[in-house]
Image (cartoon, grey):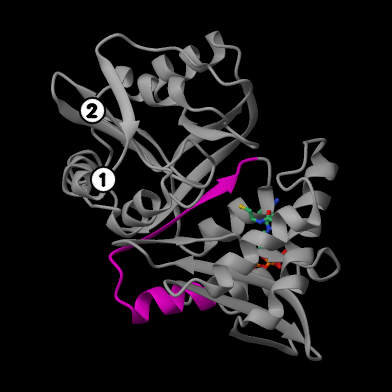
Amino acid sequence: MTVGAPEAVGIRIREAVDADWEEAGRICYEAFATLADRHGFPHDFPTVAAAAEPIRYLINHPSIYGVVAERDGRVIGSNFLDERGVISAIGPISVDPQAQDRHVGRMLMNAVLDRAQVQQVPGVRLLQIAYHNRSLSLYAKLGMQVRGSFAAMHGAPILERLPGYDVRPAVPDDEPAMNALCARVHGHTRAGEVAEAVAAGSARVVEHLGRITGYTNRISYFAHSVAETNDDMRALVSEAEDFGTPGFLVPLANNDLFRWCLDRGLEVFFVLNMMTIGLYQEPEGAYLPSVGY
Ligand SMILES: CC(C)(COP(=O)(O)OP(=O)(O)OC[C@H]1O[C@@H](n2cnc3c(N)ncnc32)[C@H](O)[C@@H]1OP(=O)(O)O)[C@@H](O)C(=O)NCCC(=O)NCCS
């Protein structure tokens, strides 16, 4: 899938190892913070540690492929490919602010796109911060298509109960129904992430009229949720005790759910675009993507 020629001179791309996490984490914090400051937006990661810990997790996860860019033996950027599902998700990608706009980002993107091609995955996706013109342009130049826009919503928990919609922790026996629901809405499962969230105790299901009509791995920026209807999704969101920041992702095309979040006092942190290569079908149902897809 490597697209286009320009490459930075003297840059080596290699697989990320545990020893890279602190420097890659610092760069991730600074790359996102510098960009947010320039546009007058709050920081995605409030501290270096808030960026570095996820980077450490990603580097050491057996189903997530990580790469770093090096110049003169020093790490200057990193990128990741989440391979837990049928679809692979790219990100976060970050390049040291001192080294940006010199094709390092392109090389890091091509490294994970090449990996996806070798692994023969049917599709690759990411969510891109809409105010960042450079990443939007880079991804489009690499062949990615914009599929939709999503508001990151945050604020105080809603803590309402919808009569007739019972939310409870998911257990391993629920996984077949959860995966079947995801396949109905998206055309593919996300079974690896579901199994992890159930084992970690963060997954919830909603039952309506005696069957599972929705699930969430966690109402969060980093996890996805799927439901038959907006009422099922409202029940899941209403029960969450903490949305974190930047908050969970609501498809702007789902006007009903977006307005409901606003009516409940939630605020928009920023807007992201979903971009894809390969397999994609319009979802048929309610859903909240993770920052991956
Ligand atoms: C996004 C990021 C990784 C890109 O890395 P980079 O090394 O700066 O980018 P590159 O130089 O490889 O590529 C930028 C491309 O966009 C093009 N570009 C930049 N601004 C553009 C604009 N306003 N309109 C059109 N094209 C533009 C450049 O010409 C270049 O294309 P080329 O490779 O065909 O010449 C880097 O800017 C970064 O770390 N940003 C902060 C973190 C972040 O936003 N991550 C992504 C979140 S979605």
Magenta stretch holds residue 131:
no
**Amino acid type for the residue under numbered disc 1:** Gln
Q: Is residue 250 above or below residue 75?
A: above
**Amino acid type for the residue under numbered disc 2:** Glu
Q: Nearer the viewer, residue 279 or 198?
A: 198
Q: Name the residue beneath numbered marker 2.
A: 228
Report the Cα–Cα distance between label 2 and label 1. 16 Å
Q: Determine whether, in the image, residue 49 is placed left or right of residue 117.
A: right
Q: Which mark is residue 281?
A: 1
Q: Residues within 10 Å of mark 2 (few under 14, many from 20)?
A: some
Mark before the other along the chain sequence, 2 or 1: 2
Residue drawn 28% across and 39% down? 282
> Which percent across, then down, holds residue 111?
53, 78
Question: In the rendered image, which quarter is residue 19 located in?
Answer: bottom right
Which quarter of the rendering shows the N terminus? bottom left
Residue drawn 42% across and 19% down? 257
Residue interval drawn in magenta: 110-130
Q: Is residue 12 visible?
A: yes
Q: Nearer the viewer, residue 209 or 78?
A: 209
Q: Are marks 2 and 1 in contact (CB under 8 Å)?
A: no
Residue drawn 68% across and 40% down? 131
> Which percent across, then down, holds residue 202?
43, 43
* Ligand 1 within 8 Å of the CB at mark 1: no
